[in-house]
Amino acid sequence: MKYCVPAKIMKIRPYLYTMIFLLLAVMLSIAIGSVIIPPVDLGRILFGWLKGVTFSDPLKTFAFILTDIRLPRTALVLLTGAALGGSGAAYQGLFRNPLADPYLIGVASGAGLGAVLAISVKWPYSFWGLLAVPVAAFIGALLTVFLVYVLARVGKTIPTTNLILAGVAFGSFATALTTYLMLLSTGELHRAIAWLSGGASQAGWEPVLAMLPFLVTGLGTLLLSGHALNLLQFGDDQAQQMGLSVTRTRTLILLAASLATAAAVSFSGIIGFIGLIVPHVIRLWFGADYRRLLPLSLIGGAGALLLADVIARSVMRPQELPVGIVTALVGAPFFLWVLRRAKNQGYW
Amino acid sequence: MLRIENLSVYYGKRLVLHDVSLEINSGEVVALIGPNGAGKSTLVRAVSGVIPAYRGIIQNDDLSRHTDLLSLSPMQRARSLAVVPQVASLPPAFTVWETVLMGRTPHLNFLGQVSARDEAIARLALQKVDALELSGRRVGELSGGEQQRVLLARALAQSTPILLLDEPTSNLDLHYQVSFMETVSALARQEHLAVLVALHDLNLAARYASRVALLVEGKIKATGTPRQVLTPELISLAYHLPVQVIPHPFVDAPLVLPGSR
């Protein structure tokens, strides 16, 4: 029967594909870096851990690299990618615009500015101090969203060009301020801010832990908002006529997406285009239903950013590229393609 | 039945609806006619709660209960009243089936989880508008007439006693206009729905509505049967155009013929 909901296997398949993609990306991210850990040794170490064996060189070195460098970094990049993919999908749904992306609409830069301001005031030596950074970034992100929304709005709609223009303009402004603050700073602070704007990842487990509460809250809320986002695609009037409390729901989703973005920016710097590419590809392959699009964008975003990070670590070994450069190299052409497509097809 | 009493609505400082009163009984189709800018769409939006009423009563009355629609939450209101909008801007990527199921929203939780019963109701709604075979298609691929039927099915899936339609035929060709209005009037009778439909086309109003309300500059100028309202005097005054009204050659309804200025 045509009208039947697709069979269960069809519902699971997209998750299967994206999870396999993510797993592959995780494995690559663990294995590849300034030192390449061969898969065989990786297996031995995992096996050894399970049995509680102590290692001798070179396994000992590999095990150290794994626990102290690769795993925390992989976790951080994974969470960042999930945050960017998820918030990108949410912003696209909220603005009803395929080009909304935390970076392109300026939210990431605004969050970055907030984070840098917080760090400038006092460099976070403690774990609790580390938690203050995403809070400041969150405030920066919200102010940006509000500003860009007001600037870009024409009556009840937000034309694509306005949204991107306002976002890019404000983003440049925030980035300029961030750079200025960086140049004013010295020593430890200088490196910290350089990391923020450059988009290279920080080491250790602490950033991962500090990120978690914000991500769980933000992404958790987004994962529950699929149906509401579906309704919002019909416009505010129709959404309300179908029973949605539009203003309340919009605010909730906006807060959640901005929280996720702020958490990502606070610990991984400003990384563009993941939030644009991933939801877009997922939509092309697996359909527009936000109840599926959101979780798939989380998984896909995590996998995509891990791959970009692996590339950033590999191409100029032992030096690293900021991962934001890799995503921009792939993302900017993609952005132009989407822009043309959206124009030609009246896609949204 | 839907009862609107002394409804006034402001856009900013401009009074766009002025003491509008109108009753629509269950089982009947009332057509809302009037020139552009008279406030037809505003009335639909105000009654459905998307713009605030300055003053007035909007009630869903049945035998035993009077429900004040203005005091309800969007969710509760959407269980009493469904709206069929113009097809102008539909998200193209959803399938027909997904779109119609969304009509079940007021009966679902925030996550939008549907039960077998919700699916059965959506299927039935598609059947009623003769669009079941479209369910797997994407809304963007459909013709204007097909999209309008899908929106009607979505409103029916809401399972409400009241149905508002905002100029549903304005983008349809002659065939779809007639068949769409035939579907609507049959549904009103069979399902015992109170239907208010804003229409541009006076002759569609004459043919398919049991009563007609003429809205001019935010005020109801006349309410009554098509014969009572569609008179040369009332219509020429409202539209600033001389008109002649003759009996329709095929059906028992008046036919409005515009003259020239």
Image: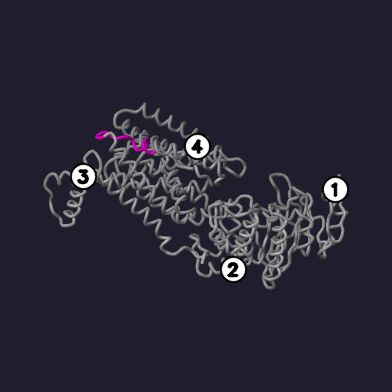
Alpha carbon of mark 3 to alpha carbon of mark 2: how far?
Answer: 60 Å
Q: What chain does mark 3 sit on? A: A
From which residue to which does the magenta span run?
A317-327
Task: Identify the element where label 2 is drawn.
Answer: helix
Alpha carbon of mark 1 to alpha carbon of mark 2: how far?
Answer: 44 Å
Query: Which residue in the structure is indicated by mark 3?
Result: A37
* Residue type for callout 4: Gly
Task: Identify the element where label 1 is drawn.
Answer: loop
Neighbours of disc 2 within 10 Å: few (<14), some (14-19), many (20+): some
Tell which tag, 1 or 4, sits nearer the viewer.
Answer: 1
In percent of width and height, residue B148 lies at 64, 57
Instruction: Choose top left, top right, bottom left or bottom right for residue A117.
Output: top left
Q: In this view, does A24 lie above or below A175?
A: below
In percent of width and height, residue A241 lies at 61, 57
* Residue type for callout 2: Leu
What colour scheme does the image use?
A: one colour
Q: Which of A346 and B184 is in front in this view?
A: A346
Callouts 1 and 3 in the same chain: no
Query: Which residue in the structure is indicated by mark 4?
Result: A167
The reply to whether discs 1 and 3 touch (Cβ–Cβ < 8 Å) is no
Tell which tag, 3 or 4, sits nearer the viewer.
Answer: 3
Query: Which residue in the structure is indicated by mark 2?
Result: B124
